Amino acid sequence: MSKKVETGERARSGLSRRDFFKAGAAAGVGAAALGAPAVVAAQTMPSPTDGITWDYEVDVLVLGGGCMGLPSAIRARDLGNDVMIIDQNFDLGGKMLHSGSQVSLGGGDPLQLRDLAGEFDKEGFIQVGKLHTDEELTEDTDHLFRDMTDWSIVDSSANAPYRYNERELHRAWADNCFDTRNFLMDNYVRFSRISGTHGNAGMTRARRASAFLMLGDKTDIKAGTVTREDAGISNTSSSHFAPRIMGDASSVVAPGAVNNGAALSRGLEFSAREKGVKIMLNRHMDEIYREHQFSGRIVGVRASYSPRILPGSNTPMQSYWQNGNIDETRETVYIRARKAVIIATGGHVGNPQFRSMFYPAMREPAFGPSAQALIGDRAADASGIIAGLRVGANLAGMQQNLSYGATAHIPTRLATRDAYTDMYPGHPTFPFRGSTGFAANANTFEHFIAVNQVGKRFFNDMNLMRGNQAGTAFPGGNNVPVRGVEITQGDWRNSGRDHIRGMYNRHAGLDAALQINEGSQGPDFHSGPLWAIFDEGAVERAELNLTYPWVADNGYFFSADTLEELQAKINAGHSYQRVPMTHLADTVARWNGFVDAGADTDFGRGEDAPMHKIERPKFYAASIVVVWHDSYGGLRINGKCQVIDMEGQPIPGLYAGCEASGGGNQHGLGRGLVHAYIAGTHAAAETAM
Amino acid sequence: MTGPNAMNQQSDILETSFDMLIDVEPGEVAAGGALVLRCAARATPGRDLRGQSVQILDDTGSTVGSLTFSMLDGATNTTEPGTFAAPTKLGSHGWRAVFAGAPEGHAPGGEAIHDFFFTVVAHRASVLVWGAPSAIAAGQSFTVTLGLKCSGGCDMAGRKIQITDASGAEVAMVQMGADQLHGTSGLHETKVTLQAPAEVSRQTWQARIARDDAEPPHEAATAAFGLNFVAPPEHRIEITVLDAETKAPLRGASITAHPFSATTNAEGVASMMVCAGSYTVWVSAAGHDPVCKYLDMSGDHTSVAELSPEAKEDPDAFYY
Ligand SMILES: Cc1cc2nc3c(=O)[nH]c(=O)nc-3n(C[C@H](O)[C@H](O)[C@H](O)COP(=O)(O)OP(=O)(O)OC[C@H]3O[C@@H](n4cnc5c(N)ncnc54)[C@H](O)[C@@H]3O)c2cc1C
């Protein structure tokens, strides 16, 4: 045996050992799946679809069963079509299932009218009175449309996002809010009182309501009830029904009401199944077929089997409800759509390569999408957007990703990769998460230092979380319409100097965290993972509970007797720690020197809280992560949610919306549910081929 | 030939190949310490190798154990990590992984072989110092705790740590006792009482263990620690810390008036002596927003600080 001495980690013959180990785990790296079929169709053939034997044929095929997918499928089904949803996950709901279910519509929608009239819901669950003044609830669709395209509104990052919204798209959006709200309520969604608004849903009126269920003896969508166990038990457990513990909705509904995405998503799912929408889970769309690559109608898709299997198990995970599921385990199937294909696959938050077009530092794969344990590594892999591009679609809203504070941000949850959620054990995907993480508000950072992959500090650690909260707020705070701030549509004063100053809460902590450092290597210059470092004294002072499920042996939390051991454990146990944290011991020594001196000359700590030495064993490292929460840049669509090509023309038979689409800067559900209603309506009206 | 097979033959990507790698942690391992190995193998066309094993051979070619594939992710098969005892001989080592199920023609007998390397290093002693008061009156005695741990897990009781002051002069030679710090594995702790110098100053002292030539040998190690020597404090700050909402006393709250600090007792009271002068006094407690007071100390000070509970992370409002 010839021996060549290699020391250290990464002296490798060609293939990096770490990359090799990670290749399988990283999303969208292009490693051919085991047993995947060979190339499907030769390029020289007259039509890419010649010779394809279609395994299934439906009128409307919906790719993805989340916020965009479920309601668009129901809508097309309501209009008399044969509809199928395929979803790469083992359960329906996508990120919507995980959401807070805060749906901002407006324009005089049925809830605004209900609250204005002093009425209650028809089932009689709501007991609280309206929460807004008549003025805050009164508007029409013109008002809503103007709000959503108002150039003068400056948000908390001193951006004016509404000016970039596609006008045709938002006109259609505003015009369809009324019907969408009714449509949702017709499909087992119960909405709370209107309470404020959120997420780039306009500034001048109250438009937000959340979906709720009532606590009861059994979980029964028809009756509108959920058991305490299914709703989740605070600080203890989630359930398969609701991956996140449902929140107390008593202030917006009545005592005993609980809300979040489960109330929205499970209601819609129940309805879709009841109405006979066909559902094929564990099925990842890989390619969309058009008659010719850049011309003709959309014909169908190719999709591969994508079961999700828990570590240590051999059997694929199962959906919460099974009725309507098509049991299909073939590696590849071809599905033809007689009328239309709706791209409802969500966005690009889980595809580091794609999202780096918006923020190059986010090519760092250490940081994942929100809801990743639930939706899996391939959910937000931009596959719908990419498949659209391959058949001639264009992109829109490329600059809009960075106007929303929560797009890429540092959540306060440490010691878990899946940090933008409070899922507890009890949901079947919890093992992918491993730990819930523990919440570290700004004050907790009094006891920590935050270091980068080489073990150096990069910011005033106290401000890392503080600034971050501002990053998700809206002008005037979370509750819009803004009370005490004068906002008049299109008024130049809205973007006057004082207002911009007032709104400018942008925090630089995220950017500092993603900065190139001594461990970044070309060509990608990944900034690497981030760690909160602390000692036993911190655990006592901050009363940290470092037990399961808050922390676990999942590569996102480490403890050790010495800093050297801590560094070695991180290096060995964290998948994205590519370089040793060579500066850690020096950084801690330097920090302790600042504590002795009473001043942090590097980052100015001490003016905001006391400083404490990091000296007493044991020593701890809890991961700090950046989460990319949602996507705005995506497929260009028009007011019918048809996908638009490079010439500005619709691609016949192709629809898209919500996070797979671009050009509309509104956050999440409000945008997506209306897109879904529009797309379902128009797809259903296509002529069958 | 038709179908996928025909394409297999034309495509470079689908040519038969078999790659195997061993992940070695740590790349530099303490003599006799734990070496964690993990194997990954990628075959084209893809293969499910779960249940099959890879033999691990040491420098002499004798089998020291095996790793069994248990996970398949895309095209990559991986084993669980396996722990092996590192050799005690210092220097570089080359071990070999042999997999007996590689495709025909890949290697004689269908064996895939991967050589991997690591370095065995001398044990490292880590010296730690903690618990010095944040301010020490000049000329007084004070106590710190010394910690000592061997990276290779050796029993460090009886080893000597030398403490030197800012000038490098030895102020103590401490023999480590057998006590180990609770919750650690093999971290010896010993308290030592030291004498502060007469002059007021901020100094860095050192705790050092010399290199020894035991089998296996330990490298020398040093820990620096900062000390604030102050004039004799003459005024008392006493602060009672309460929760602003419940008015309940907060135990374990920190009072900091640099360089002085104290912690509240069960009654929420912290008391400390400080030198005359002006101070920014921070009061902080878990789950509360800190408050800050400015004090000119020319006499004793007594006050009550009420801390507001910090805004709770409301999941409903927070995750949207
Ligand atoms: C914790 C959390 C809280 C939130 N709270 C709110 C809130 O209160 N209000 C709000 O407005 N928004 C909220 N959001 C955001 C909102 O949930 C999303 O923006 C919205 O669900 C996106 O809808 P979508 O249809 O584009 O994607 P999703 O709802 O994620 O659905 C996409 C579906 O497509 C599937 N899929 C992806 N690729 C493929 C493929 N190639 N083939 C087959 N299937 C595929 C996925 O598995 C998924 O089921 C929240 C999100 C999270 C994570």
Image (cartoon, rainbow, N blue to C red):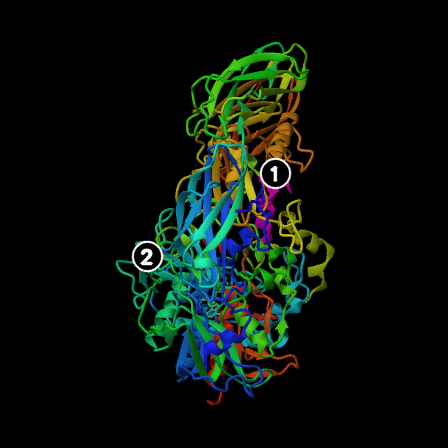
Task: Report which quarter residue A447 is drawn in.
Answer: top right
Residue lying at the far front of the rendered structure: B108
> Of discs 2 and 1, which sits in the foreground?
1
As helix, strand or loop, the secondary structure at mark 2 comes to: helix
Q: Residue at x 29, y 61 (%)?
A: A219
Residue A582, label in figure: 1
Could you tell me residue B24's position as x and y percent?
A: 50, 44
In the drawing, does residue B138 fall left or right of residue A326? right
Could you tell me residue A125's position as x and y percent?
A: 34, 62
- Give the amino acid at mark 1: Thr
Compare residues A14 and A298 and report the one nearer the observer.
Answer: A14
- Give the amino acid at mark 2: Asp
Circles 2 and 1, Cβ within 8 Å, touching? The answer is no
Q: Mark 2 highlights which residue?
A: A230
Compare residues B123 and B300 and report the one nearer the observer.
Answer: B123
Compare residues A574 and A253 and report the one nearer the observer.
Answer: A574
Q: Residue at x 47, y 28 (%)?
A: B252
Give the letter of the chain under mark 1.
Answer: A
